[in-house]
Image: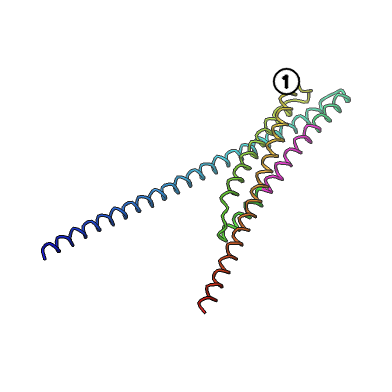
Amino acid sequence: MKKYLSLFITTLFVFSSGFSFALAEENNQAGLISQQKVEIQNIKEKISVEREAIKNKIEADRAAAKTKFEALKASLKTEKDTIKAKIKEERLLGREQALERFNNATDRISALKDKVNALITKLEAKGIDTTSAKTLVGVAETKLDSAKTKITEATTLLAGSTNQLTKENKTALKTLAQETKTLIKEAHQALIDASKSLKDSLKLKKEANKQNKEEKESTETTTE
């Protein structure tokens, strides 16, 4: 009897130890997952703050550039040579129009980004995987911010004076223009890819729901 009792106690101890170990391991895993979630959230918040700071700087630089252009236009009123004044006025107008085209392009990309984000929110609420789309939108935002920064640099060059650009400034401006076009194109492509990713995820969800429904109906038919 003592022998069986001892065996029972030993078995109980081993089972209890194994269960405690498994429970501790599960708790540790849950703790790690929770910690990872917190770290990811902190990174997201940091990125959000940084992007907001970039956005505010870009808007401030745009406003400052506009003020500079207005000041340059006002300075033309003191130009006694009407022909020179006309040439400088047309030069400023051409520069403003060039910058406006770039700004309009980034505004269109921003509008498209907002539409994709709205779709992500809508589909996410339905339990559809939007991870890939979110990553691509993040890529687009980074490209877009970089494009806006390039435009700001170009604006600084163009709003410097009413005189012709130096050879060095012309070269710098050409480089900035090309880099800006590339960034805008890449941002647009990332958003197109994000939209496609959402459509693919939606399609997979519908197919999975259809398959589950068919399996359920098949099971019910079999049991009848």
The foreground one among 61 and 190 is 190
* Front residue (pair 95, 29): 29
Q: In percent of the image, x 58 and y 69: which residue is there?
A: 214
Name the residue carrying label 1: 168
Q: Is residue 190 left or right of residue 13?
A: right
- Quarter residue 140 falls in: top right
- Whole-percent x and y of residue 211? 58, 65
Residues 84 and 7: in front is: 7
Instruction: Report how many numbered discs are placed on residues in the image.
Output: 1
Q: Is residue 118 above or below residue 140?
A: below
Residue type at the position of mark 1: Glu
The x and y percentages for residue 121 are: 59, 56
The image shows residue 5 at horizontal and vertical percentages of 14, 63
Question: Which sits in the foreground, 127 or 89?
Answer: 127
Residue at 29% x, 53% y is 21
- Colour scheme in the image? rainbow
| Farthest left residue in view | 2
Q: Secondary structure at mark 1?
A: helix
Above or below residue 141? Residue 178 is above
Packing grade of label 1 (10 A; few <14, some 14-19, many >=20) is few
Residue sticking out furthest to the top? 167
Residue 88 vs residue 15: left or right? right
Magenta stretch encompasses residue 100: yes
Relative horizontal placement of residue 191, taking residue 5 as reference (left or right): right
Q: Which residues are magenta?
A: 94-112
Magenta: main secondary structure: helix
Q: Residue at x 79, y 23 (%)?
A: 164
Residue shown at the point (31%, 54%) measured from the top left: 22
